[in-house]
């Protein structure tokens, strides 16, 4: 029996995609989105890039026009925070005291930026997750501003690039030896350190903030672990997120580490699905369990969930994909590698046009490309094929990679 009323908790990439996919697949029952956000679903990746730089106007940032929700009979309820619930009673409790019933439930609650415990709770110490956060960072980047970025992961690195493009003075402080180390490994991280330095960012790696200096309720400077004191006007703490697991926890779902354990089709319990940043997914093609904090993954999770609820449970097989744009450097990544995988380089690192293949047991697990879209697309096909590939062929620019992709049939 198909559900009559699907309730989606979370109005982000996964939640919004689930709602529209339900309709696209012909679901005729009620669809309700409960979102703690003040704004209707928007394109989060813009918030550290084009929107932050003022290149894209507000209306373009939203995923849909307001009218699309009524046209598709999607009841979008903003500023509604779910705080508890019961799977047996098929019911959620909201912070307002209201209760909401469901037949099927989708949880896509995303994450909350971590803060540093010793950082002052000051108006010029910011984090970035929501549209309003991005507006606050944008407003804070006044002429002559010196921005301190604490953390050089994707958000820190992208905001650093945007701020430099806006002509701001940027100090980037990262405890790891290179930027983006956790996501991209040491060697590619080193390339990114050079990219930022060449564009005028003051990159201090292997460094932390030791002391915060405030005056009149605002942070005015920091003393770093290298002993140097730096004056700053605005601080962005960008040290990652904690997935929002309060609701899945309250419902008694299986939490493992920092994710909700789901099956290959993203189902966490009978009639309950989880997608996006919170889902710990046994990926059917990669044959490993992964939790991925990326936009396209959240969207295809949402689409997969909508489709499963509307037309029958099915595995979600798409390969993880993400991108990051910093200055004129465009990074794309398909698959999922771990730090132990063998890295095979192809292309020209100095010219910033290269790809890296990550190999485990003879098979390609992931491909990372910098300004090399074509290789990334073919690389994705090679990952999907699960076929053993010779590392020398991957590294050899004379080999046409397309010829390594097995043909159908
Ligand atoms: C600034 C920024 C830039 C990014 N750029 C990129 C990029 O270039 N490429 C890329 O691949 N990824 C990027 N990402 C990551 C990507 O945006 C996330 O992985 C994606 O948004 C996750 O989608 P989600 O649906 O799981 O969560 P979210 O999009 O975070 O949505 C979660 C939703 O749940 C709501 N919510 C939370 N708790 C509750 C509750 N208890 N009750 C009701 N509602 C609740 C929130 O208000 C929100 O609406 C970026 C992220 C940020 C913050």
Image: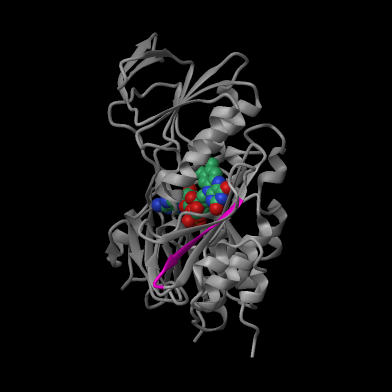
Q: Nearer the viewer, residue 218 or 355?
A: 355
The overriding secondary structure of the stretch rendered in magenta is strand
Q: Tell me where residue 288 sits by quadrant.
A: bottom left
Q: In the visual, does 398 lie left or right of 195?
A: right
- Residue 161 image position (x, y, % from top left): 59, 33
Which residues, given as a range, are shown in magenta? 354-361
Identity of the residue drawn at 37% across and 36% down: 177
| Rendered image quadrant of residue 174 | top left
Above or below, 363 relative to 130: below
Q: Residue sitting at 66 percent across and 64 percent down?
A: 398
Task: Quadrant for residue 57, please give it.
Answer: top right
Q: Any magenta on residue 357?
A: yes
Could you say where residue 230 lies in the image, as x and y percent from the top left? 41, 14
Residue 64 place in picture, x, y as percent: 68, 54
Residue 393 image offset from top left, x and y in percent: 57, 68
- Whether residue 373 appears in magenta in the rendering, the answer is no
In this view, the residue in front, 179 or 43, is: 179
């Amino acid at each position: 029996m198909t559900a009559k009323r699907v309730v989606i908790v979370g109005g982000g990439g996964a939640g919004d995609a689930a709602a529209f996919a339900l309709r696209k697949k012909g679901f005729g029952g009620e669809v309700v989105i409960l979102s703690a956000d003040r704004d209707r679903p928007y394109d989060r990746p813009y918030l550290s890039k084009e929107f932050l730089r003022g290149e894209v106007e507000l209306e373009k940032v939203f995923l849909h026009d307001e009218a699309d929700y009524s046209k598709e009979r999607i009841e979008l309820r903003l500023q509604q925070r779910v705080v508890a619930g019961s799977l047996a009673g098929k019911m959620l409790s909201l912070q307002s005291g209201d209760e909401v019933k469901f037949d099927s439930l989708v949880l896509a609650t995303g994450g909350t930026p971590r803060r540093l415990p010793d950082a002052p709770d000051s108006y010029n110490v910011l984090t970035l997750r929501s549209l309003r956060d991005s507006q606050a960072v944008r407003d804070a980047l006044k002429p002559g501003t010196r921005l301190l970025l604490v953390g050089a992961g994707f958000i820190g690195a992208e905001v650093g690039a945007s701020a430099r493009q806006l002509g701001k003075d940027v100090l980037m402080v990262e405890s790891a030896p290179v930027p983006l180390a956790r996501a991209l490994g040491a060697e590619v991280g080193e390339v990114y350190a050079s990219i930022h330095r060449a564009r005028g960012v003051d990159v201090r790696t292997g460094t932390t903030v030791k002391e915060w200096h405030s005056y009149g309720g605002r942070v005015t400077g920091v003393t770093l672990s290298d002993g140097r004191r730096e004056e700053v006007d605005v601080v962005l703490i960008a040290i990652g997120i904690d997935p929002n697991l309060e609701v899945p926890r309250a419902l008694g779902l299986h939490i493992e580490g920092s994710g909700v354990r789901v099956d290959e089709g993203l189902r966490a319990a009978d009639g309950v699905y989880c997608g996006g940043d919170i889902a710990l997914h046994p990926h059917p093609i990669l044959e490993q369990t992964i939790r991925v904090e990326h936009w396209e993954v959240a969207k295809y999770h949402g689409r997969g969930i909508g489709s499963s609820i509307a037309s029958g449970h099915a595995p979600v097989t798409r390969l993880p994909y993400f991108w990051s744009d910093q200055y004129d450097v465009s990074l794309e990544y398909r698959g999922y590698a771990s730090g132990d995988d063998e890295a095979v380089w192809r292309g020209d690192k100095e010219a910033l046009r290269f790809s890296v293949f990550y190999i485990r047991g003879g098979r390609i697990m992931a491909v990372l490309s910098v300004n090399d879209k074509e290789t990334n697309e073919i690389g994705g096909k090679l990952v999907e094929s699960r076929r053993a590939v010779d590392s020398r062929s991957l590294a050899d620019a004379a080999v046409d990679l397309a010829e390594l992709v097995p043909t159908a049939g």
